Image (cartoon, grey):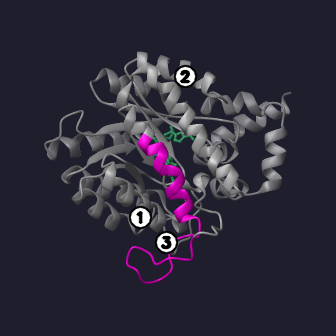
C-alpha cells in the first residue's frame, strides 16, 4: 500500500523541497544515482564496462517548466556524448531519455494540438514538436559515436507522443529504442506493432501511478502480462531488452529466448544501477549482454522516489537514516 503513496509524493513540490533538503538524503540517493556531473559518471561508466557490463545513461530530470530547461537537458546529453567519444565504447554505452525533460510536457507556441497516430482525437501534448526537435540532435550525436538512444516510457498520457517520436526518429536512425510497460492494457498491441517492425524495445513492468481504467493493479496480472508481451517480442523481428530485476522473469526470459531460437546477444538484460548488482555480474559472466541503467544529475527527486516506491524496505532504510542522525 505504501507504493502508491510514495508515487503520489513523487509529484508533490512540497515533498520535493522537504526531501531534497534533508541532510542525510544524499547518502541514500547515492545508492541509485551515483553522481551529479559528467565528471562523476565517466569513471563509473569505465568501471562498469571494465567488468564486462554495458550501460545506458540517464541525465535525471522531468517535469520541466520552460523551453530553456528543455534546451539545457538536450545540451547536457550532447555534452555527455562528446565526453564519451574518446572512450570508444560504441553501443556499450547508450543513452536513455525522458521526453518530458525535452519539452514534451510544455505548452509550445509552435504547435497546435495535433491528431494522434490515427489522425483522429487530439492525442499529442502541445510540446510534442519541441521534444522531437530537442531529442533529434541527441540521437544524431549518439549515432556519430556509434551508439543509440532509447526513449523511456513515462505516464500513459505521454505514450502516443513518445511512440510517434520514436517512429519519426527511426526513419533516419532505425536503432533508436523505446520502452513499453506491462502494466498497461494497451501494451500487448504496442508490442505486436514494435516486434513486427524490428524495433529495439525495452520491456519493463511500469513505475508510475496509473488508474485501473488503463493499467493492471495487481502484481500477478502485471507479471503475467510481462510474460505474454515478452513472448511476442522474442518471437518478433526486433531486439528485446528485458528491463527487470525479477528472478522469475529472468529465468522465463531465457527460456522464451531459447524457444524462439535466439542466442545471447540477440536480446539483452537491463537492470538499474544499485539494484541486484551481483546479478548484473552473474548474467554477464554467463555470456549475456547485461546493461546497467545508470542515472546521474542533480534533479534526482522523481527518479529516487520511484525507486523507493518499488521497494518499501528502501523507504524504511531512508527513514531510519534520517531519524538516526
Ligand atoms: P519487482 O518490482 O517485482 O522487483 C523484483 C525484485 O527486484 C524485488 O523483489 C527486489 O529484490 C528487486 N527490486 C526491484 N526494485 C527495487 C528497488 N527499487 N530497490 C531495491 N530492490 C528492488 N519504468 C517505467 O515506467 N519507464 C521506464 O522507462 C523504465 N525504465 C527502466 C529501465 C530499466 C533498465 C529497468 C530495470 C527498469 C525500468 N523501469 C521503468 C522501472 C520498472 O518499470 C519497474 O518499476 C522496476 O524495474 C521494478 O520492477 P521489477 O521488474 O524489477 O520487478
Quadrant of the frame with the N terminus:
bottom right
> Mark 3 or mark 2, which is nearer to you?
2
Percent x, y of residue 34 = 62, 27
Picture residue at 56% right of the left edge, 65% below the top: 210
In the displayed orientation, state which residue is furthest to the front: 110
- 123 in the magenta segment: yes
Disc 3 designates what residue?
A: 214
Specify the quadrant of the image occupied by residue 248. top left
Query: Mark 1: which secondary structure?
Result: helix
> Mark 3 or mark 1, which is nearer to you?
1
Disc 1 designates what residue?
A: 164
Q: CA distance from mark 1 to mark 2?
A: 32 Å
Percent x, y of residue 274 = 55, 30
- 16 in the magenta segment: no
**Residue interval drawn in magenta:** 111-140
Q: CA distance from mark 3 to mark 1?
A: 19 Å
Disc 2 designates what residue?
A: 42
Amino acid at each position: 500500500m505504501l507504493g502508491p503513496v510514495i508515487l503520489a509524493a513523487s509529484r508533490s513540490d512540497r515533498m520535493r523541497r522537504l526531501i531534497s533538503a534533508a541532510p542525510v538524503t544524499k547518502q541514500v540517493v547515492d545508492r541509485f544515482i551515483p553522481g551529479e556531473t559528467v565528471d562523476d559518471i565517466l569513471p563509473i561508466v569505465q568501471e562498469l564496462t571494465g567488468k564486462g557490463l554495458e550501460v545506458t545513461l540517464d541525465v535525471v530530470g522531468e517535469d520541466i517548466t520552460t523551453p530553456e530547461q528543455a534546451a539545457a537537458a538536450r545540451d547536457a546529453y550532447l555534452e555527455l556524448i562528446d565526453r564519451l567519444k574518446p572512450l570508444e565504447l560504441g553501443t556499450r554505452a547508450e543513452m536513455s531519455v525522458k521526453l518530458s525533460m525535452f519539452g514534451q510536457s510544455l505548452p509550445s507556441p509552435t504547435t497546435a494540438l495535433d491528431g494522434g497516430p490515427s489522425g483522429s482525437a487530439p492525442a499529442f501534448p502541445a510540446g510534442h514538436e519541441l521534444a522531437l526537435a530537442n531529442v533529434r540532435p541527441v540521437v544524431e550525436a549518439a549515432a556519430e559515436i556509434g551508439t543509440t538512444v532509447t526513449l523511456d516510457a513515462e505516464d500513459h498520457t505521454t505514450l502516443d507522443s513518445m511512440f510517434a517520436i520514436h517512429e519519426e526518429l527511426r526513419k533516419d536512425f532505425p536503432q533508436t529504442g523505446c520502452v513499453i510497460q506491462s502494466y498497461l492494457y494497451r501494451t500487448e498491441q504496442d508490442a505486436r506493432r514494435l516486434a513486427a517492425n524490428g524495433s529495439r524495445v525495452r520491456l519493463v513492468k511500469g513505475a508510475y501511478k496509473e488508474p485501473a481504467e488503463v493499467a493492471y493493479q495487481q502484481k500477478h496480472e502485471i507479471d503475467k502480462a510481462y510474460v505474454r508481451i515478452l513472448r511476442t517480442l522474442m518471437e518478433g523481428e526486433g531486439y528485446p531488452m528485458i528491463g527487470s530485476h525479477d528472478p522469475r522473469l529472468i529465468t522465463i526470459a531465457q527460456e522464451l529466448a531459447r524457444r524462439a531460437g535466439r542466442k545471447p546477444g540477440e536480446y539483452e538484460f537491463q537492470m538499474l544501477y544499485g539494484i541486484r548488482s551481483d546479478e548484473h555480474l552473474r548474467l554477464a559472466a554467463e555470456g549475456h549482454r547485461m546493461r546497467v541503467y545508470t542515472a546521474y544529475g542533480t534533479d534526482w527527486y522523481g527518479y529516487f522516489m520511484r525507486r523507493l516506491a518499488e521497494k518499501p524496505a528502501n523507504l524504511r532504510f531512508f527513514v531510519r537514516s534520517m531519524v538516526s542522525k
